[in-house]
Image (tube, coloured by chain):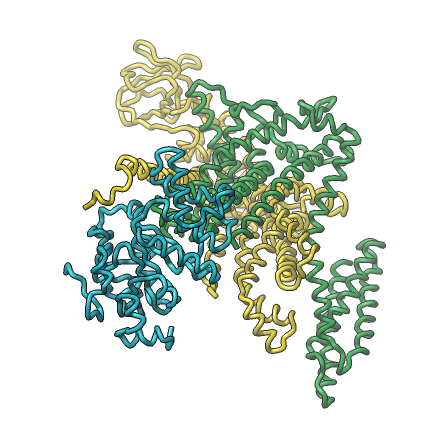
Chain colours: A green, B cyan, C yellow
Amino acid sequence: MTSWTLLIIAALTATGFFVGQAKAQGLRNAGTASLHSLPAYHGLLMASMALAAAGITTLAVAAIAGPNSLVMPAAAALLGTGAIAASYRIITRDFRARNRFEFFVMLVLIACSAVAVLTTVGIVFSVLFESLAFFSEVSPIEFLFGTHWAPTSTPPSFGLIPLLAGTLLITFIAIVVAGPLGLLSAIYMAEYSSRKMRGVLKPMLEILAGVPTVVLGFFAALTVAPLVRNAGESLGLNVASESALAAGLVMGMMIVPLISSLSDDIINAVPQALRDGSYAMGATKSETIKRVVLPAALPGIVSAFMLAISRAIGETMIVVMAAGLAANLTFNPLAAVTTITVQIATLLVGDQEFDSAKTLSAFALGFVLFCFTLVLNYIALRIVQRYREQYD
Amino acid sequence: MDASPQMPTLSKVPRILNERETKIVASDVNVYYGEKQAIKNLSIDIPDRAVSAFIGPSGCGKSTFLRTINRMNDTIDGCRVTGDILVDGKNIYDRDLDVVQLRARVGMVFQKPNPFPKSIFENVAYGPRIHGIAKSKADLEEIVVNSLKKASLFEEVKDRLDHSGTSLSGGQQQRLCIARAIAVNPEIILMDEPCSALDPIASARIEELIDEIRQNYCIIIVTHSMQQAARVSQLTAFFHLGDLVEFGDTDEMFTTPKDKRTQDYITGRFG
Amino acid sequence: MTDTFDKGNAAFIAKRYASERRFKAYGAVALAVSVLFLVYLIVDIGIKAWPSFFEHRVVLEVNLDASKIPADEVLKGDFEGLVRGSLRSLFPRVTTRGDVRSLTSLLSAGAADDLRQDTAANPASIGTTVRAGALLGDDSDLYLKGMLTTTLRMPGTTNLQLAQSGEEFILTGDLSQLAVGQIVRANGGALRITGVEAGLAKAEAILPPATLNSLTPGTWDILSFSRAEADRRIDDRQVVLLEALRDKGVIEKHFAWRFFTSGDSREPELAGLRGAIFGSLLTLIMTLSLSVPLGIAAAVYLEEFAAKNKWTEIIEVNINNLAAVPSIIFGLLGLAVFINFFGLPRSAPLVGGLVLALLVLPTIIIASRAALKAVPPSIKEAALGVGASHQQAVFHHVLPLAVPGILTGTILGVARALGETAPLLMIGMVAFIVDVPKGFTEAATVLPVQIFLWSDLPEIAFQSRTAAAIIVLLVILFGLNAAAIYMRKRFERRW
């Protein structure tokens, strides 16, 4: 019935447009005084009335009687036609169709921009409700401070600490790799490279940023992990085949373009006058960068790092493919660790029952992840905003 | 290259050049931005321990020429300079010249005050630090205080040297920038419309300051205000469309300009 | 004169310049590391992927026996049997059950598929003998690509005598060429050397020789391997058969169109991307048809109409935060709201598209706002000046001028959606799907998820397939990025 209903709504909308336009055109041809609005606006208004009436009816019927009910297309047709008939009568020479139509458009625009807010609300509620269901079975204290994670064993234990430690370990490795690389790359591109070289280098980093994480995960698991392992063994170290180091290294490379492009923007936003002031004192380029540009750009760079950390914490595919599943509580980068995102993915892939603590725990992990990244993002964005205002 | 520069529209050597040593000798200087020529065949002598003013309508090349003297135009893509600029007889466009050391000798104050987003103290200490001028912490403090005093800013900020340089008023910021330039102990100070972003009272303080320090430095000031040029300078050069039209003693220049264009500009027919 | 320019001492200046050079070098090294990583990544995956774009077939003369093919249902004919029979006819001496199994195991499970399709398309060929390419199995294929072992052939240059005692064969004569583990091919058979002692070499039959004639130079050869039988996925008997096929000149190498035209399969040599590509396409259509209108409308409202108040501020903060929320969280949203609450079907492009639409919405809004902001206000003012309403000014003048910028942002959003994996795992787009999805509500998979699924499989051949799928995905993504860069260059307008 859905496709029939959609067809009817479309037909009514089109009819509304032509009927409205025709009536207005008739008035225009007949009368001496000019219309307030162009005939097309009368048509558009009538079309939107028909669309709104039929559409809302359909949604209402679908909600009450289900999408397969025969009532749906019938009710849509009835109310749509009614809307056309009703608005046909109010088309007169002085009728302000344009203003009414623009009001309608404005409502649509506002509704569209509210979707973003609804998404956030949706995220918060979906994660929160399932988490609450989880916490009715497992105490939050046990979840937050437990040091043992084994959701599938009997009895299961849900201790967050090993996952948190694993996540932070891999994130730390990633930032240690990406921080210097990204920042120095940005400095080189912004301050040293010629325009031509920048034209080559920037797209290269954009390409690196565009490589899907599933690809990086494959690369981490099949190429980097064995490399790390062999390197470690040649030094006489015992390296797990799914070491935190391999996943962290590749994740670091994933973040390099993020840090470099954010830092590049921020360094470029430092006014040239400050550099000129320093050069005019006889400072070399690196002295200017280290003592004037970077201190001036510091807040922005800090926030770039925070966004990078948030990105690393939330990254899923690289760790799913290259990090382990075993929840070891260790800070040894050569050992296998697991992360929050890996556990969410593992718990939810396949069939789920929404009444088991195992499934629900994934949402609790999601809640932790969401809070973590939200706080980081919010602070970072506020810092950037202040920073922008300073130099605008 | 001819040792004695060609003097444009110059019946006699300006008085001030006879009274003072010549600090800067520019001969046949051309500056190009890509294809566009911004300075055409310019030659000029600039005296030490005096204020020289560059005047002229917008886009005439006076700021461009100013920036060639400490090679700030090196930072602009596609900018090319030909000809010679000698400072104390040394060509600053020689291949072996070190720009960093040149700029330590040729300080610059910009159109818009551009204090670093650091404390007042750090702003002034920046130059001595990078050039390794101060031998000790006490030494550095002394340099900073002296520079601030010379820039007649010390009394206003002595209680808040640790406040940010950007927290000062516009006029104070500009004096801070002058103090910052002085701290490196330069011989030449270039000022690119230093008062154009300031209100009249702050401008007057800067002018006073220039007057106080001119005995110790070779100062070149680019200005849009002819009154200012008349008030602070001893030598005035008038630029028009990349040409140096005329230069001479300031008092004579404003009373008896020789070139028609100078006369028109001074009397306000264009510009 | 230079001495007048020495302000500080020379050593201090030299130190400053050394530090300058060092700092610049750090930057160059950092950039080089990032670029080299990218190059290494692409080259490494490219090398892994390359073999997967080719497949080996054995070309057989197949008699399309009418009794084996029902005339009314050609597709149900026993083409497997026909192909196997034809392969066996190439080796009349392969008779034991074990040997026959080895021979037919060289073929893919889908070896007869091409022939079946061809015959169905051309039923007139039934009853005749046709030349048909039969696809080899993944192990045979890998062997022929040299990925399982490197095989060395040496022509026999000495005289040897052959004798049999029970199951064992004895070689005597000049044994200088022989070593344990090698295979001697002579007299129509193949012998594996099991021991070389003083004056004689012991061997076992891989394929029994037809005669025990003496071996003279040029009549026999030796196969030796870089990897012993126990360490590779293909045994000596299969190798001997494959080498025999190669000697007969019936093995052909072709570009593997199959990789693009067939769906997923448990057999690596049959697995293709068709289903995943169509799944991605459907999902993207869904994503775009939602996120583009929503994104543009939201951007127009926020940039052109919204009053600067609390509500607008909330929306803005929201969008910026949403852009940085981990993608897996969107997967949780999809699972809890679309599937669990609204009861939409799992694994479907409909839900995948919805989730990805919400995921890229902030990107599109931010890009569109930037594009709208770049249009100078004078344009709008000019329109308002001639009496256009605010909306007319925006929709007739500002928005059209912002379209290139919006389009660029949209393309980048699409690229992001196309490479996204994690949220789709959450909503169950991980099912094993052979067929092309027929609609938005049918189970489907997408390219990146297909990559994830294949990367998990143990077969070596799937590793290469995974790499090849990655190359396909990367080519599409680079194409999209190039399009975005082109658009930006082509329509860039400086005001």
Residue A247 in percent (x, y) is at 52, 32
Q: In the rendered image, which quarter is residue B212 located in?
A: bottom left
Q: Residue at x 43, y 13 (%)?
A: C166
Q: Residue at x 51, y 40 (%)?
A: A255
Relative to residue C459, is residue C73 drawn left or right?
A: right
Figure label count: 0
Residue A364 in percent (x, y) is at 71, 34
Residue closer to the observer: C201 or C467: C467
- Residue C138 visible (yes or no): no
Relative to residue A11, is residue B95 drawn left or right?
A: left
Residue located farthest toward the top when viewing the structure as drawn = C198
Image position of C219 with respect to C168: above or below: below
Q: Residue at x 46, y 40 (%)?
A: A182
- Residue A311 visible (yes or no): yes
Residue closer to the observer: B142 or C283: B142
Image position of C23 with respect to C371: above or below: above
Image position of A184 with respect to B253: above or below: above
Residue C229 in percent (x, y) is at 44, 22
Q: In the rendered image, which quarter is residue A109 located in?
A: bottom right
Residue C333 in percent (x, y) is at 70, 44
Residue located farthest toward the left when viewing the structure as drawn = B2
